[in-house]
Amino acid sequence: MAPTLALVGATGAVGTVMIDIINGRESVPWGEIRLIASARSAGKKIMVRGEERTVVELSPEAFDGVDVAMFDVPDEVSAEWAPVAAARGAVAVDNSGAFRMDDEVPLVVPEVNSGEVGNRPKGIIANPNCTTLSMMAALGALHREFELTELVVASYQAASGAGQGGIDRLHAELEAVAGKGLGSKAGDVREALEAAGLPLADSPFAGTPLALNVVPSAGSYKGDGWYSEELKVRNESRKILGIPGLKVSATCVRVPVVTTHSLAVHATFAREVTVDAAHKVFDAQPSIVLIDDPDNGRFPSPADVVGGDPTYVGRVRQALDFPNTLDFFVCGDNLRKGAALNTYEVAEQVIATL
Amino acid sequence: MAPTLALVGATGAVGTVMIDIINGRESVPWGEIRLIASARSAGKKIMVRGEERTVVELSPEAFDGVDVAMFDVPDEVSAEWAPVAAARGAVAVDNSGAFRMDDEVPLVVPEVNSGEVGNRPKGIIANPNCTTLSMMAALGALHREFELTELVVASYQAASGAGQGGIDRLHAELEAVAGKGLGSKAGDVREALEAAGLPLADSPFAGTPLALNVVPSAGSYKGDGWYSEELKVRNESRKILGIPGLKVSATCVRVPVVTTHSLAVHATFAREVTVDAAHKVFDAQPSIVLIDDPDNGRFPSPADVVGGDPTYVGRVRQALDFPNTLDFFVCGDNLRKGAALNTYEVAEQVIATL
């Protein structure tokens, strides 16, 4: 019998991308595809693989008969409902932060550690944070060859990392500031946003303008100066790569880009690494696209790669003063590989283990 | 007799900011202030310290009687004319890249190495690149206390680093993309710019959209994967701080901000360093403003500090896995401290050595 797939959070920002991905990848012939959301969205009709399907309300019974349940919902919803799905016999693939660091829950990026998919004592598999995921295919490939030991990263994170509200806010801010010659006087962007009915207190970006600006914090404050996004990059990279002692420092910064996270990566390895050797590793990885042509000034940038499935890599160079170290720049669509796509790839792999 | 000051490039982007700085700082009672520019701008009238002054054309005679000549012009103009000014008896303070790495030309940031001002065998003093300068007051202060050994930085560089053309381009791009919901489909920003009569071939930003995007290259390509801005950060930091063996890796990225460069800095020291000790060092430096309040989510960002003279520092934290290492975020107005202000501060110090 063809397996049944459930999508919890079918009407959210990531859920919408997920439906696009389900429609575009025919590799698994799902039997039923069940769309689940909160009571507010129940009853909505959405086309999936050529059939109109009605969104049903989240309830224990909604998981009956489900083989794989993908969760694209806030942490607290996953924390409550992924165990319910598992208890009803589904394998829950969760894109929230609720279970990522749980020792009994594997944290999976198929290109890196697909072997972990079958190792799920709680019936739950976690999907990494979008910032970590945006660089993980590239780092995993390099790690296999050269053995990663240290990682210093700075992020250029897109507005959609804060959900549909983040996207809408950035578009509204851009409209409010465009054509006014702002950005050369302290506070003029802030004043223009307030005047346009976009109070900073309502912003998902730390009460700081995102248009014509960058915001040097992402996620929530976790003490000792560190924000949650930065600690996720550290802790999740260690778990996915299986390097408990990996040295990591991350600085996470929001930039006025709609979708696609970028990272400047400074990665040190146990073994010698050259640009040529790294290019070969990237070229051999089907999910990585190398755009690294300094002679013609061609590199990946968010506006040119958004909506794509691969991890895009460029600006690969050998650090001049640090042995066995590469500096490079990586872009990944935070809603696709950074969220929905990776979750779906894990769901596809779960089928092989049932 | 009150000294005579000349400003070469008085009508450019940095020159305009320079006049604002001359008007705002009365510490040196200049006698004559001579405005010099290309033939195209000669004859223009500009108010300086309450007097209307006429821009004169660049010529050897324009430097006669000048004590200090500040150059805010392209490299090739400085390369030709700073020696001419020096030969006519002026001390040239040059903001271009023409002389920065010349062993007989000091590269000066007053807070860090003002002692070098008098050591100018060629009669020329160089002003650092704006990206390096944006973090140098902070790094110099930390270095004095803790001895800097390693530096990994990623930049968030403003459009005005590419001059007035960069500012105009960003404003035009923002106007062309605002209100259209772009940035979620690869190439849609690029298409909108072309359609709006803003061909990417004309852009100062590597033929890549800057609106709703980040551009992972700045300056010109120098081989082995490295761009000029990145090598300047390395070489100039070493020279200014007087650490020839300083280990540096920089990734320079342009962001859609009008003015004020930001940097994510990962700095390793020979001696133990804590957040409290770093805060004390920053607080003691008059040209640094510390905005580091994670409990209220308050940190510096370009839109809130642009136009200011200080270096703004925040997000100071101890690296979790790297000994004696701090991560922090720094913002500096690239046209003021990053260019005109530092040049003018050097000019003020030259007076004391005449």
Image (spheres, coloured by chain):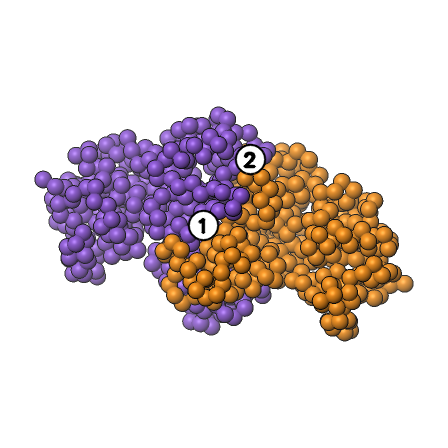
Chain colours: A purple, B orange
Q: Quadrant of residue B276?
A: top right
Q: Is residue B212 left or right of residue A97?
A: right
Q: Is residue B282 left or right of residue B264?
A: right
Q: How many labels does the image show?
A: 2
Q: Quadrant of residue A54?
A: bottom left
Residue B281, percent from left and from top: 64, 46
Q: Could you tell me the amino acid type at mark 1?
A: Ser
Residue A7, percent from left and from top: 21, 49
Q: Which residue is drawn at 85% across and 61% down?
A: B61
Vertical comparison of B239 with B188: above or below: above
Q: Which mark is residue A301?
A: 1
Q: Are marks 1 and 2 on the same chain?
A: yes
Residue A86, percent from left and from top: 19, 41
Residue ID for mark 2: A319
Q: Which mark is residue A108?
A: none
Secondary structure type for disc 2: loop
Q: Distance between the residues labelled 1 and 2?
A: 22 Å
Query: Mark 1 or mark 2, which has the lower sequence index?
Result: 1
Vertical comparison of B261 with B22: above or below: above
Secondary structure type for disc 1: loop
